[in-house]
């Protein structure tokens, strides 16, 4: 009996050692990764754009366009379609579409680059109130404009013809290209520079060269404003061309 117990004890001892080793191995094994959950459907990337937040973006953009203007600017935004379903944009950017202008009845674009690219167009009306000049009385064709011929008015410049005179210096000393009645806005394209050489006028032809200057009298055969090329005929019948200068001078540089 004693011999049987002695033989069994080593077997039990070995089993206990194996059990302890297995337990230690289980304790040293890293835990399994937790299951990965599905992404939340309410993440900010899925948020929708607040359309009312686009109005300040447009107004700020138009204010920058008017920087430096001394005139009074007012902006009226058109309706943004409430049915638009746009992805939320952290930095929407306003811009002028090609061919649009920054005043009057026009369109302003708003675009988003990320996380989802989109762009929309919003109708706007930009009014620019300022001074402009009208004719103080009737003007004849070819009349040279003086200060007494101008009268200052004030109104929405966006409703006036393009090129309207907003500074007296743009008109004084220039000539009308047509007859005008009193009270009409003056436009730059209706005026031309005053002639400094007239056809049939006696002119002085001055020829400049290295270290010399020669002048002779001639008769102009064409009209010219300052800086234009005019022609004249000398007493010998020679036709010369030169740059028209104030005081009836044709300048030839050799």
Image (cartoon, grey):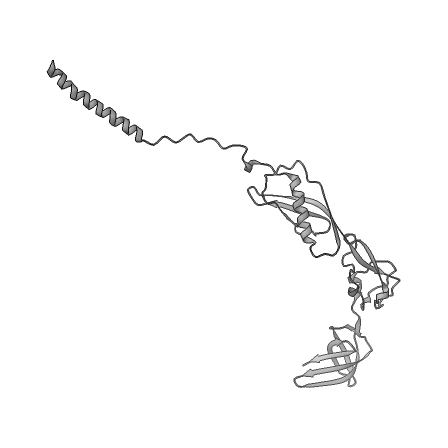
Whether residue 94 is visible here, answered yes or no, is yes
- Considering every residue shown, the one lying at the far top of the view is 1
Residue 67 position within the rendered picture, expressed as x and y whole percent measured from the top left: 69, 55
Quadrant location, the C terminus: bottom right
From the viewer's perspective, is residue 4 above or below residue 20?
above
Quadrant location, the N terminus: top left
Place residue 167 in its image quadrant.
bottom right
From the viewer's perspective, is residue 59 above or below residue 231?
above
Please state the total of marks drawn on the protein image: 0
- Which residue is rendered at x = 67% and y = 48% of the image? 60
Whether residue 99 is visible here, answered yes or no, is no
- Which residue is rendered at x = 77% and y = 82% of the image? 204
- Which residue is rendered at x = 67% and y = 45% of the image? 56
52, 120: nearer the viewer: 52
Residue 225 position within the rendered picture, expressed as x and y whole percent measured from the top left: 77, 72
Q: Is residue 25 left or right of residue 92?
A: left
251, 163: nearer the viewer: 163
Residue 231 position within the rendered picture, expressed as x and y whole percent measured from the top left: 76, 77
- Considering every residue shown, the one lying at the far front of the view is 2
Place residue 151 in its image quadrant.
bottom right
Residue 216 position within the rendered picture, expressed as x and y whole percent measured from the top left: 76, 85
Place residue 192 in its image quadrant.
bottom right
Q: Is residue 222 left or right of residue 117?
A: right
146, 57: nearer the viewer: 57
Q: Is residue 41 left or right of residue 147?
A: left
């Amino acid at each position: 009996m004693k011999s049987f117990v002695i033989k069994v004890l080593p077997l039990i001892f070995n089993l206990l050692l194996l059990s302890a080793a297995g337990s230690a191995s289980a304790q040293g094994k890293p835990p399994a990764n937790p299951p990965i959950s599905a992404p939340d459907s309410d993440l900010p990337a899925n948020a929708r754009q607040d359309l009312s937040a686009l109005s300040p973006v447009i107004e700020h953009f138009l204010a920058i366009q008017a920087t430096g203007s001394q005139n009074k600017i007012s902006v009226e935004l058109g309706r943004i379609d409430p049915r638009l379903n746009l992805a939320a944009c952290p930095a929407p950017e306003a811009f002028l579409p090609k061919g649009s202008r920054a005043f009057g009845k026009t369109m302003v674009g708003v675009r988003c680059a990320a996380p989802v690219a989109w762009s929309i167009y919003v109708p706007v009306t930009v009014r620019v109130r300022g001074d402009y000049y009208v004719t103080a009385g009737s003007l004849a064709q070819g009349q040279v404009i003086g200060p007494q011929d101008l009268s200052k008015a004030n109104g929405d410049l966006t409703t006036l013809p393009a090129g309207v005179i907003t500074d007296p210096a743009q008109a004084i000393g220039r000539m009308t290209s047509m007859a005008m009645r009193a009270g009409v806005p003056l436009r730059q394209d209706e005026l031309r520079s005053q002639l400094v050489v007239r056809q049939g006028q006696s002119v002085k032809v001055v020829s400049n060269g290295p270290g010399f200057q020669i002048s002779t009298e001639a008769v102009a055969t064409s009209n010219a404003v300052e800086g234009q090329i005019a022609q004249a005929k000398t007493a010998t019948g020679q036709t010369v061309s030169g740059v028209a200068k104030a005081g009836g001078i044709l300048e030839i540089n050799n």
